[in-house]
Image (spheres, grey):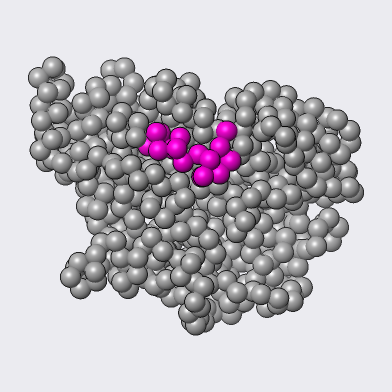
């Protein structure tokens, strides 16, 4: 593995955000504005979805070798129904074993066949999936239409990631013949292919799950499990009988190094070949040091949920609005990331094709105080509980939020949660909180699937308890939109209603950056910040 070598800037990089920088600006006078990084570059050009500094061109792939990937978090099981099929939680490792029926092409902004030969529809209600001929699972059994239907049923029966959204919209799955499946939906769903590019589209061999007590990771992907050492590494070996062009690698190795700073250090020294990072500071530093990679920009990368259920302070719309008026995203990021990142209350940042231009609630402490006094006059005592992570950024954010809210008259009781499982329990199962920091991370390729889970009145993923018939109708309209051009009018209404009713308060846009060294080629990003490694190679 070769260490990172500094790259010459390419003129095309400005189009995909491959521009400098790390750290925070020391002052607006010295660096231009808080909209720029410490290197003086506009953050809007960095936090834009797309490849950064990648120029593989017509280079001929080299066979052999091992690609070492520093993942964001350790995957403890390769059963897609028990792990989250996204890039932050081991989704790429599962994709390497199972492959996906389709993939998302970020350059063309279209869903393309992968395991499937085609996916077609005339009305966005009935979708016909045709499978490639001759594809086999790693155990030699054929990948046919029945195995697709059965695997997806296993996925939804176990309420896996995205399963609730799929179940609410899928009317039937029908085996037409050995290579054809017909999906009939309840209503128009233009981005239905995103389901097949994610966890539901990771098709398992029947033998993988026929014993409920002994799951076996058997798929049709380019790699299969070789070894797993908890807390150390997951090693996958190449399948020689994979249906596609690759794999070129002999092995794919996943490691977990802790924080993003450690990952960037290992990437720089050549300890790993590629690293998945989410922290704004390390992300901006990696781009400043001109690493090639893929930027996944998302809306509401950090936000505060306000619990509006009966008996909670947020049941009162005046309290919700007072919280929004009291919070200053720039102050929050200054405390948490030393100013790195894109502070915004908007659902999508300006660089997103889904950015609506709807003005958010400006920070106005005086207006917040007035609303809070009205609520107190009607019996509210001003006390709210704020949940946050127990790590450094979570604690720093808790201090910042507490200070801003108490400045306008709230009494804030901070509570640090030490594990992700604790956060899931409190926010999504017990709904036991008043305010809580979270990351909705809405991707440009399919905002509907995120927003329907978070904001639809009857959704089991709706942690805030927000219930609004107008929002439900708008989300149904958004479901039929295939592109930002088709859906921007609806998104504008959604954002306007978000700022009016305040189910939550935006703090920052999101930016996940997977960076790699000069010896890495053929990296193929897909949906949910995941990568497909069938054509990856190293020199």
- In which quarter of the view is residue 517 placed? bottom right
User: Residue at coordinates 15% horizontally, 22% vertically from top-left?
Assistant: 375
Please indicate whether residue 468 sits to the left or right of residue 459 in the image.
Answer: left
Query: In the depicted view, which residue is nearer to us: 106 or 503?
Result: 106
Relative to 397, does residue 279 appear above or below in the rendering? Answer: below
Which quarter of the image is occupied by the C terminus? bottom right
Q: How many marks?
A: 0
User: Residue at coordinates 37% horizontally, 28% vertically from top-left?
Assistant: 464
Relative to 59, does residue 275 appear above or below in the rendering? Answer: above
In percent of width and height, residue 320 lies at: 25, 30
User: Residue at coordinates 60% horizontally, 59% vertically from top-left?
Assistant: 107
In the image, residue 486 lies in the stretch drawn in magenta: yes
In percent of width and height, residue 214 lies at: 73, 37
Q: Is residue 515 visible?
A: no
Please indicate whether residue 447 sits to the left or right of residue 147 in the image.
Answer: left
Relative to 125, does residue 238 appear above or below in the rendering? Answer: below
Please indicate whether residue 58 sits to the left or right of residue 420 in the image.
Answer: right
- In which quarter of the view is residue 417 placed? top left
Please indicate whether residue 349 sits to the left or right of residue 69 in the image.
Answer: left
User: What residue range appears in magenta?
Assistant: 480-495
User: Residue at coordinates 55% horizontally, 52% vertically from top-left?
Assistant: 529
In percent of width and height, residue 512 lies at: 47, 56
In the image, residue 500 lies in the stretch drawn in magenta: no
Q: Is residue 494 visible?
A: yes
In percent of width and height, residue 298 lies at: 45, 50
The secondary structure that dominates the magenta segment is helix
Which quarter of the image is occupied by the N terminus? bottom right
């Amino acid at each position: 593995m070769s260490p990172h070598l500094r790259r010459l800037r390419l003129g095309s990089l400005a189009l995909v955000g491959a521009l400098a920088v790390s750290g925070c600006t020391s002052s607006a006078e010295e660096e231009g504005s808080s909209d720029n990084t410490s290197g003086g570059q506009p953050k809007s050009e960095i936090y834009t979805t797309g490849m950064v500094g990648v120029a593989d061109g017509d280079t001929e792939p080299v066979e052999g070798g091992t690609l070492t990937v520093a993942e964001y978090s350790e995957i403890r099981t390769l059963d897609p129904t028990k792990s989250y099929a996204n890039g932050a939680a081991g989704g790429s490792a599962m994709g390497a074993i199972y492959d996906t029926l389709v993939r998302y092409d970020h350059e063309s902004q279209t869903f393309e066949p992968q395991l499937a030969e085609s996916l077609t529809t005339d009305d966005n209600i009935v979708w016909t999936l045709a499978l490639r001929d001759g594809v086999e699972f790693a155990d030699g059994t054929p990948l046919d239409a029945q195995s697709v239907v059965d695997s997806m049923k296993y996925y939804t029966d176990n309420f896996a990631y995205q399963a609730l959204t799929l179940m609410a919209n899928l009317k039937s799955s029908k085996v037409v013949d050995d290579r054809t499946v017909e999906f009939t939906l309840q209503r128009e769903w233009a981005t239905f292919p995103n389901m097949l590019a994610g966890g539901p589209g990771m098709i398992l061999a029947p033998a993988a799950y026929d014993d409920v007590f002994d799951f076996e990771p058997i798929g049709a992907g380019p790699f299969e499990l070789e070894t797993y050492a908890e807390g150390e590494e997951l090693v996958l070996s190449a399948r020689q009988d994979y249906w596609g062009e690759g794999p070129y690698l002999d092995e794919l190795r996943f490691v977990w190094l802790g924080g993003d700073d450690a990952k960037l250090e290992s990437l720089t020294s050549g300890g790993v070949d590629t690293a998945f990072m989410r922290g704004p500071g390390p992300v901006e530093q990696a781009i400043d040091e001109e690493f090639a990679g893929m930027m996944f920009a998302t809306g509401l990368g950090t936000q505060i949920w306000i619990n509006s259920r009966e008996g909670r302070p947020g049941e009162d719309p005046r309290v919700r609005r007072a919280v929004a008026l009291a919070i200053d995203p720039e102050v929050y990021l200054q405390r948490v990331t030393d100013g790195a990142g894109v502070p915004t209350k908007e659902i999508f940042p300006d660089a997103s094709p889904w950015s609506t231009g709807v003005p958010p609630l400006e920070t106005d402490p005086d207006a917040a105080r007035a609303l809070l006094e009205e609520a107190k006059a009607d019996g509210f005592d001003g006390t709210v509980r704020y949940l946050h992570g127990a790590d450094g950024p979570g604690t720093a954010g808790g201090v910042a939020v507490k200070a801003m809210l108490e400045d306008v008259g709230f009494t804030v009781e901070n509570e640090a949660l030490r594990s992700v499982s604790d956060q899931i329990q409190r926010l999504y199962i017990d709904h036991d909180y008043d305010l809580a920091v979270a990351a909705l991370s809405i991707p440009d390729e399919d905002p509907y699937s995120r927003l329907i889970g978070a904001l639809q009145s009857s959704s089991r993923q709706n942690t805030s308890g927000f219930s609004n018939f107008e929002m439900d109708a708008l989300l149904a309209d958004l479901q039929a939109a295939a592109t930002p051009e088709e859906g921007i009018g609806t998104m504008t209404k959604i954002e306007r209603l978000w700022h009016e009713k305040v189910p939550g308060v935006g703090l920052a846009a999101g930016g996940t950056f997977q960076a790699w060294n000069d010896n890495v080629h053929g990296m193929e990003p897909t949906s949910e910040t995941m990568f497909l490694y069938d054509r990856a190679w190293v020199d």
